[in-house]
Image (cartoon, rainbow, N blue to C red):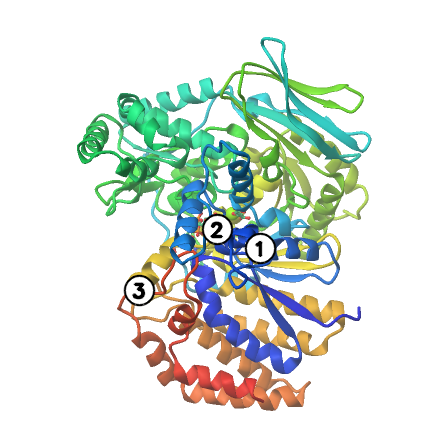
Amino acid sequence: MSKTPKIIYTLTDEAPALATHSLLPIIDAFTDPAGIEVETRDISLAGRILSQFPDYLSDEQQLGDHLAELGDLAKTPEANIIKLPNISASTPQLKAAIRELQQQGYKLPNYPDEPSSQVEHDVKARYDKTKGSAVNPVLREGNSDRRAPQSVKGFARKYPHRMGEWSADSKSHVASMSDGDFYASEKSALIEAAGNVKIELVAADGSTQVLKEQTPVLAGEVIDGSVMSRRALSAFIAEQIEDAKQQDVLFSLHLKATMMKVSDPIIFGVAVEAFYGDVLAKHAADLDEVGFNANSGIGDLYATIKELPEAKQEAVKADVEALYAERPRLAMVNSHKGITNLHVPSDVIVDASMPAMIRDSGKMWGADDQLHDAKAVIPDRCYASIYQTVIDDCKANGAFDPTTMGSVPNVGLMAQKAEEYGSHDKTFEIPADGTVRVSDESGALLFEHAVERGDIWRMCQTKDAPIQDWVKLAVTRARDSGAPAIFWLDAKRAHDAQLIRKVETYLKDHDTSGLDIRILAPVEAMKVSLERIRKGEDTISVTGNVLRDYLTDLFPIMELGTSAKMLSIVPLMNGGGLFETGAGGSAPKHVQQFLEENHLRWDSLGEFLALAASLEHLGNTFGNVRATLLAKALDSANGKFLDSNKSPSRKVGEIDNRGSHFYLAMYWAEALAAQDEDAELKALFARLAESLKSNEAAILNELNGVQGKPVDIRGYYHPDHDLTRAAMRPSRTLNEALNVVANG
Ligand SMILES: NC(=O)C1=CN([C@@H]2O[C@H](COP(=O)(O)OP(=O)(O)OC[C@H]3O[C@@H](n4cnc5c(N)ncnc54)[C@H](OP(=O)(O)O)[C@@H]3O)[C@@H](O)[C@H]2O)C=CC1
Ligand SMILES: O=C(O)CCC(=O)C(=O)O
Ligand SMILES: [Mg+2]
C-alpha cells in the first residue's frame, strides 16, 4: 500500500471529548516525530447537526459531513479510525443541542415535532438523521471483538473494584411480557435472490398504504418482522406498576431509547402514560396545547408547561406530587434534583443501567437517596431473560469476586447494520388496524402480521457476508485464546433458527478440530458462562447485535468495574481497522462533576488500548516500522500504567483524567527511551522521559491544583474550543515539555 500512513481520531461529545483536549496533544507529540499523521474528524452531535444545515449557516459556521466521509473511508482497506463514544441523541438531547447552538449564534431552525409544511418535513428529516444511533452503524463496517486484555484482568485482580453484597432474599427482579411482544411475533424469511422487498399495510377497510416501497436485499440475507402490541404493552406496564406497589420495590424501566431510536421511545412513552395517566388525562387539553410528548419523558412535562399560566403550572405539579403518594416508589436518576427513571428516555440505558444495578447488590436509588430492591421492567423477552439469570445466580451464590472471576469476551455480529440496529427506517407506529405484509418483487408474500393502531412493527435485516465473517472471527478467537466459544442463539426464535442453520454450515468452512464450540439459547449460555466465570474460566460469547451491546457492558462492569477498560476492535470487512475506545458511553455524570469541581474522572484506558491497536494495525498494513515501534512501546506503557494504578480517581483533588494522561506520556516516553531499534526516537524520547520524570511533582501540582472550583467552558454540546483546551491543559510544565518534542 503506497498511501501515507494516517490515523483518524474522532472528536465526539461529553467526557470523551473533554479528555481528547488533553490526550491528543500527547498523541501528536509521539506520532509527529515518527512521521505518522493523526487527523481529526468531528462526529459530535453538534457537528452532525451543523453538517446538515449549510444553507442556514454563514460560510465560517459551516461544517462538512465528516460522518459520511468516515462511513466511506470505513469501506476501504486504508481505514484506520479511532472512534470514541458519542451521544446517540434522544429527542430532548437533540432539542437541547439545537437550543445551545442557536444561543451561540447559529441560525438553525427549531425541531418541528409535528411538521406541517414541506420545509418543516425537510428540516425534521435532516434533524432525524442526527438522532439516535446515527454514528455507530455507519462506521461499523465489520463485526466486533471486545475483550479485557490479560494486563487489564491482572489490574482488576490486583486492584479489585467494589462489588455490592447480594442477599438471598433480595426482592429485585426483571419483569417482561408473556405475550404480544416482539419475541412472541417474530417471523423470518431467507432471501434467495437479490432484489427489493416492499412493506405495506392493508387496513381493515381494504385500503393499502405503502410503509416502505423498496428495501434492497441480497441473496442469502435473513429478514425478520415482529410487532409489539400497544394494548398488551399498556396492560403489562399497568400490572407491573401495581405489582411493584404490592411488593414494595422501586419501579424502574430499562430500554435503549437512544440506539433503538424509533421503537424504544414509543415504548418509553407508553410507560410514562401508564404511570402518570391520571394526571395526563386530567390536564390533557392544556398539555396538548403546549405540545407535551410522553415519548420524551415526564421531564418534557416540566419543560412544556412553562408556557402555561403560573396557576396552571402549579396545579399540574401538585397533581404529579399527589400521584407519587399513590404509585409505587420510582427508581431515581438523581434524587437531589428529583429526576426519576421516567424523566428523560436517554437517562437510563439498559446496557449500562442493568449492570450498575447488579453491581450495587441488585438495588437502585430511591427518592430518599438510599439503595432499594427494584423491579426492572424490560418489556420485550428477546434478551431480557439473561439479566434474571444473573440475578438468580447472585442470589444463590453471592456477588462475583473480581479477584478470582474469569472473563466473558464477545464476538458480536454487527456489520452492515445487522439485526435490530438497522431497523430504524423499517420501524413503524401503525396508523390503522389491519395487516402488515412484506412481499418480494414477484408479489410473493414473505411474511405478514395482524396489527392494531398504535402497535410498533419493525423489520430487521442481516446480510450473509457479515454472518460468515462473524463465524470466522469466532473460530479465530477460540483458536487464539483456547477458550470455549458459545453462540447465544435461541432455536425458539424464527430469526435465531435461521442463524443456527447458517452457523452450522459456515463452521464447516473452518478447522475447528480441538475447539469447544457450542450453540445455546441465551439463558443456557448465560448459566454455563456464569458457572465457568465463578471457577475463574473464560468463555467467549458469540452473539447477535443486541446481546453484543448488553454483554459488553455487563461482563466488563462485573469483572473490571467499568467497560472503559475494554479493548474494542472492529476488524473492517474490507481490511481496514476501526478501534473503538472501551465499551462505555459518553458519561454525562462525569461532565457534571467536571463543570462543578474541575475534576474529570473519565478513564482513558480504552483510548490508550485503541491507540496501541491502531498503531499496530498501521505498522502491519503499511509496513511502517516506526508505527510498530510506537505500538510496542505503548503496549508496555499501558502495562506499567495499569500496574502502577494511575487511573483517575473519582474524588476531587486527586489524580484525574489529565494526571492519568501525564503518566501515560511518561511511561510511553520511557519505553521508547529503553528500546534500541531506532536511535533517533530513542534520543528524542529519552529527553522527554527525563524532563517528565524530573518535573513529576510540579506537573501533578499544576494539574491537581486547579481542581475544586467550577469551570466554565460556555457550552455542553458545543463548548468553546479555546476555553476547553485551556481547562484541560492546565500544566504549563507539561505543555512546554511536549512542545520541546514537537519542535524537535
Ligand atoms: N459507543 C458509543 O458511542 C456509545 C455511546 N453511548 C452514549 O453515551 C451516553 C450515556 O450513556 P450511558 O448509558 O449513560 O452510559 P455511560 O457509559 O456514559 O455511563 C454509565 C457509567 O459508565 C461508567 N463509565 C463509562 N465510561 C467510562 C470511562 N471511560 N471512565 C470511567 N467510567 C466510565 C461510568 O460509571 P461510574 O459513574 O460508576 O463511574 C458512567 O457513569 C448516551 O448519550 C449514549 O447514547 C452509550 C454507549 C456507547
Ligand atoms: O450506538 C449507540 O447508541 C450505543 C452503542 C453501544 O452502546 C455499544 O456499541 O456498546
Ligand atoms: Mg453498549
**Which of disc 1 and disc 2 is earlier in sequence?**
2
| Neighbourhood count class around disc 1 (C-alpha, 10 Å): few under 14, some 14–19, many 20 upward | many
Q: Residue at left 47%, top 50%?
A: 108
Q: Which residue is mark 1?
A: 147
Residue placed most toward the observer, 660 or 725 = 725
Left or right of residue 27, residue 596 in this image: left
Vertical placement of residue 438 versus 743, above or below: above
Amino acid bearing label 2:
Ile
Residue 531 seen in this snapshot:
no
| Neighbourhood count class around disc 3 (C-alpha, 10 Å): few under 14, some 14–19, many 20 upward | some
Residue 104 found in image quarter = bottom left
Q: Which marked residue is nearer to the observer: mark 2 or mark 3?
A: 2
Q: Quadrant location of the C terminus?
A: bottom right
What kind of element bears circle 3?
loop
Q: Which residue is mark 2?
A: 87
Per the model, the C-alpha gap separating discs 2 and 3 is: 25 Å
Residue placed most toward the observer, 69 or 108 = 108
Number of marks in the image?
Answer: 3
Task: Give the percent coordinates (x, y) of residue 683.
Answer: 60, 91
Residue 144 seen in this snapshot:
yes
The image's mark for residue 651 is 3
**Is label 2 within 8 A of ligand 1 (CB to nearest ligand atom)?**
yes
